[in-house]
Amino acid sequence: MEITLQQAGFAFLAAVIVVFSVMTVTTKRILRAATYLLFVLFATAGIYFQLNYSFLGAVQLLIYAGGVVVLYVFSILLTRRRRCATAASSRAWPLRWPARCSASSCS
């Protein structure tokens, strides 16, 4: 039994999907997880193109890969550390303490 080029390509894309799917759920860094998810989505689109589902492959690339770009933006915005703000809030803690106590007693 000979392996054709399409079978080898399908096996390669399937292996990429499996490996990067596992890496997506096991990594602890959100940007790496988003990058691995992008690779999974590209490989899935490659399988669609190989099966001559051009429209489905194009939708996979445009919609889901665009969603990963949005995930990048949100992950950068939500996980950015503000060292100046935490230092300022820790220094201003004694000044905010009476205001917090009075606000919690009113409600």
Image (cartoon, grey):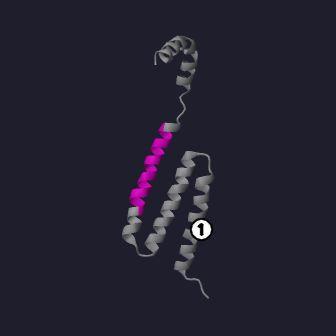
Q: Residue at x 51, y 16 (%)?
A: 100
Q: Residue furthest bottom?
A: 1
Q: How many marks?
A: 1
Look at label 1 and name its amino acid.
Ala
Question: Which quadrant does the N terminus fall into?
Answer: bottom right
Magenta stretch holds residue 106: no
Q: Residues within 10 Å of mark 1 (few under 14, many from 20)?
A: some
Image: 63 above or below 55: above
Q: Residue at x 44, y 56 (%)?
A: 65
Q: Which residues are magenta?
A: 60-77
Depth order, front residue of 103/33: 103
User: Measured from the top left, where is residue 56 in percent x and y?
Assistant: 39, 67
Q: Residue at x 55, y 46 (%)?
A: 30
Q: Is residue 70 left or right of residue 81?
A: left
Depth order, front residue of 93/49: 93
User: Measured from the top left, where is residue 66 in percent x and y?
Assistant: 41, 53
- Give the main secondary structure, helix, strand or loop, of the magenta stretch: helix
Image: 61 above or below 68: below
User: Measured from the top left, where is residue 55 in percent x and y?
Assistant: 36, 68
Image: 51 above or below 88: below
Q: Which residue is mark 1?
A: 15
User: Measured from the top left, where is residue 60 in percent x and y?
Assistant: 42, 62
Q: Residue furthest left?
A: 55
Image: 22 above or below 90: below
Give the structural element (helix, strand or loop) at label 1: helix
